[in-house]
Image (spheres, rainbow, N blue to C red):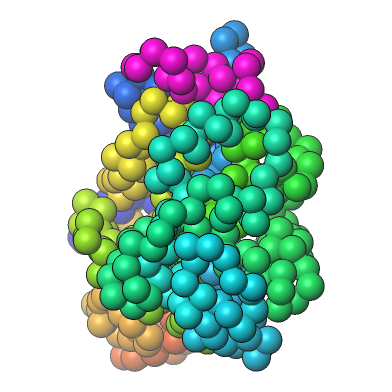
Amino acid sequence: MRVFYIFLLFLLPSIVICQIDAGLAEAFQTTLDEKRMELNAKGLGAAIVVPTGEIWEGVSGVSGAGTNLTTEFTFGVGSVTKTLTAAVLAELHVEGVLSLDDPLSKWLPTYQNVDSTATIRQCLNHTSGIFDYRADTVLFETVLGNSEKIWTPEEILATFVHAPNFAPGQGWSYSNTNYTLAGMVIKAATGKEYYELFKEKFFDPLEMTTTITAPFQQGINPLADLWFDAFIPGIPLNISNLYSTDGMFSIGNSAGGVVSVPKDMAIWIKALVTGKAISAEAFEEMKQFIPRPAGGGYGLGLTSGNLRGENVLGHSGNIIYVSEVFYFPGLDISIALHSNDGTKFNIQPIMADLMETYKNYEPSAVYEITDQQNISIYPNPVSEFVNLEFELEHSSNVSIAIFDIFGKKVRTLYAGNLFAGKYQKQFDLDIVNGTYLVKLEIGENTFVERVVKY
């Protein structure tokens, strides 16, 4: 008799819905706490959607002095907003409302320092050459000097945009101005503000109930206090006590004005990349990546790269609040990580640590399996069809099922009585990519094999 020891959680009661494995949740929280303390950041919020669709949410640190963060607190997500703006325009392109290759002049009037021959696509992939208004040397002090002022896109263009960096299509240069113009094109083409379409197309259908575009929509959840070394370099100050965020978020606009909890952003990026948020045709447009000088690729509001050996798709954000929102195709997980500490802008290593926590985690319960059968499963890894071969010495009840790695049943592949003999059964694994356990029960004997679907 051969004895196999396979890590497998006992099944949860059927009344428990979307509750992530307790051991994995504890591992995520430990990582978040330890890495925040190593970074000495004020506060972090994170959420991870695992392949089963279950979601872990965690926070570490404070909002303001004496107020601990909870999962109810929202953060500015900064340039992660660009994924939404680009998704709207990609869908409008597929619907025939506009073409991504339309010049700006087709939809907008002429603005000083804006080359209106640049196309919508060139704005979205940052090849327009248009100056980035955030590079204006007096932007920060101007906005803080009148922090309650809500800036219009036209005022941003007139006040902070300088001469172009290069002619359209002649280089690559990241520019928030590109996405301010993109939001204006949305309004010109549809008659609706970009943030109205965010809500209509994405926030409502995906039940992202805590996500808004500030300051034009009012949130129901508290906004985490913002810390920044506005006066003394290296010394964080709670600037939420001194300034309104209205001016800052209005400057962000369709380039960076979204406010959300990490859970909503983790849901959003996975839905976008896996085809649940926009059409396949629209996402193909977004995936037209061109090389970035810093490495990786930039599509339409979407970056591609590699993080500690794993391919990633998503976007980073910095509107003093710092954000990392990425999907890991090889693991079928998405991670959203946000910080309210603008003095600690490099939080991507913490997202990588959370990813590795998931990769390295093994459920703690041990399921002992005995097997006296001649059984094989192939191919493994499998892209579509998996084959099971086994032999029965006598008539037996046979059950074949597939589970996720945390012990939750995904699907029953077969259940019934079979006569003695040799069998070869083929099953279509029409499931999302990831690691699974195939469990074969023959009478009182059980066989479990780990299978990778890619």
Q: Is residue 71 above or below residue 258?
A: above
Q: Which of the 4 quarters of the picture holds residue 242?
A: top right
Q: Residue furthest top?
A: 66
Residue 106 image-quadrant placement: bottom right
> Which residue appears at 69% of the width and 63% of the height?
194
Q: Is residue 124 above or below residue 137?
A: below
Which quadrant, please, contains the C terminus?
bottom left
Whether the magenta-drawn stretch holds residue 358 is answered as no
Outermost front residue: 112
Q: Quadrant of the N terminus?
A: bottom left
x, y percent for residue 39: 32, 24
Q: Is residue 214 left or right of residue 310?
A: right
Which SS type dominates the magenta stretch?
Answer: loop
Instruction: Please tell me whether residue 266 is drawn above or below residue 36 in the rendered image.
Output: below
Q: Nearer the viewer, residue 305 or 430?
A: 305
Magenta stretch in the rendered image: 225-244
Residue 190, x across and y down, in percent: 75, 76
Q: Is residue 184 above or below residue 418?
A: above
Residue found at x 57% / y 59%: 180
Residue 312, image x, y percentages: 34, 61
Q: For this view, does 22 lie left or right of residue 332?
A: right
**Residue 407 seen in render:** no
Would you say residue 418 is visible in this rendering?
yes
**Which residue is at the front of the view, 308 or 343?**
343
- Residue drawn at x 40%, y 59% as measured from the top left: 163
Query: Is residue 233 highlighted in magenta?
Result: yes
